[in-house]
Image (cartoon, rainbow, N blue to C red):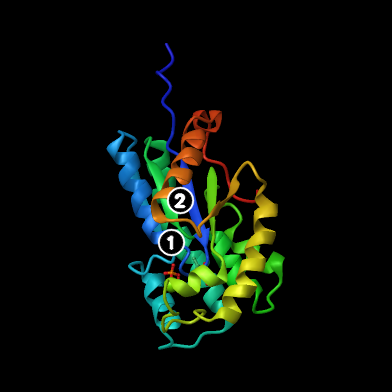
Amino acid sequence: AAAPSRRRGAFIVFEGLDRSGKSTQVQRLVDALNARGVQTKGARFPDRTLSTGKMIDSYLSQKADLDDRAIHLLFSANRWERATQIVEDLRNGVTVVCDRYAFSGIAFSAIKGLSWNWCRAPDVGLPQPDLVLFLRVSPEVAQQRGGFGQERYETSEVQGKVEKAFTRLGQSVGEEVWTEIDADKGVDEVHEEIVRRVEQALGSEALDGEVKKLWE
Ligand code: FDM
Ligand code: MG
């Protein structure tokens, strides 16, 4: 007799600009899902604890300079360092909620003038998210939430360009995966909206099948 089928976990990715509330919402979602018995783990990229993450951290904190292509490949390698673990968790029925992914990778590099295809290539074949929640915050609300920090990319010029790149990326994965959330609203309201969207994803037939590969 065939083994009883068990649904895999969902791979849920958050993307968004600085001050969009990503980290807060990732934590809220992980807690809410675990509280209702959906076994869930959080993840984030860049993962600064990995070996590639140390170099990325020096670059972001402006302690080191790196060629645009070199840092791009490090960000991608940082995801590949974790990819096997993510797939294993999903297969074991664990839902993974991730703060940033390959979409940030492409957006932040493409705005430097690197070609779209070149930027996408190293991430082709990574685990494909079942759902991407793009937290869209207006510049006015982001401003009210506090000023920029000291890291690279934390300027309104970069954030404006990255926002345009994200919009284009959403079109490349399709609206059944990419969902925009109005992140100007309060934390609780945004959380409720996210939970509604995640419930749909958790009910999807896709979780009866294998984890797909991104852009393949
Ligand atoms: N970032 C993040 C990239 O440039 N490429 C990537 O692949 C990823 C995942 O790193 F400015 C940028 C986006 C952001 C910076 O991210 C650090 P956090 O979320 O603030 O740690
Ligand atoms: Mg940051």
Quarter of the figure that contains the N terminus: top left
Foreground mark, 2 or 1, reads 2
Q: Is residue 124 above or below residue 62?
A: above
SS for tag 2? helix
Residue 139, image quadrant:
bottom right
Disc 2 CB within 8 Å of nearest ligand 1 atom: no
Residue 4, image quadrant:
top left
Query: Which residue in the protein does label 1 denote?
Result: 21
Query: Which residue in the protein does label 2 denote?
Result: 190
Q: Which of 20 and 132 lies nearest the eye of the viewer?
A: 20
Residue that protrudes farthest toward the top in the picture: 1
Q: Which of 91 and 63 lies nearest the eye of the viewer?
A: 63
Q: Position of residue 173 (x, y in %)?
A: 65, 50
Tell me the amino acid under the disc marked 2: Val
Q: Position of residue 61 (x, y in %)?
A: 40, 83
Whether residue 56 is visible: yes
How packed is label 2: few (under 14 Cα within 10 Å), some, or many (20 or more)? some
Q: Is there CB contact under 8 Å for labels 2 and 1?
A: yes
Q: Residue at x 45, y 68 (%)?
A: 19
Q: Which of 12 and 21 lies nearest the eye of the viewer?
A: 21
Q: What is the C-alpha distance between the residues marked 2 and 1? A: 9 Å
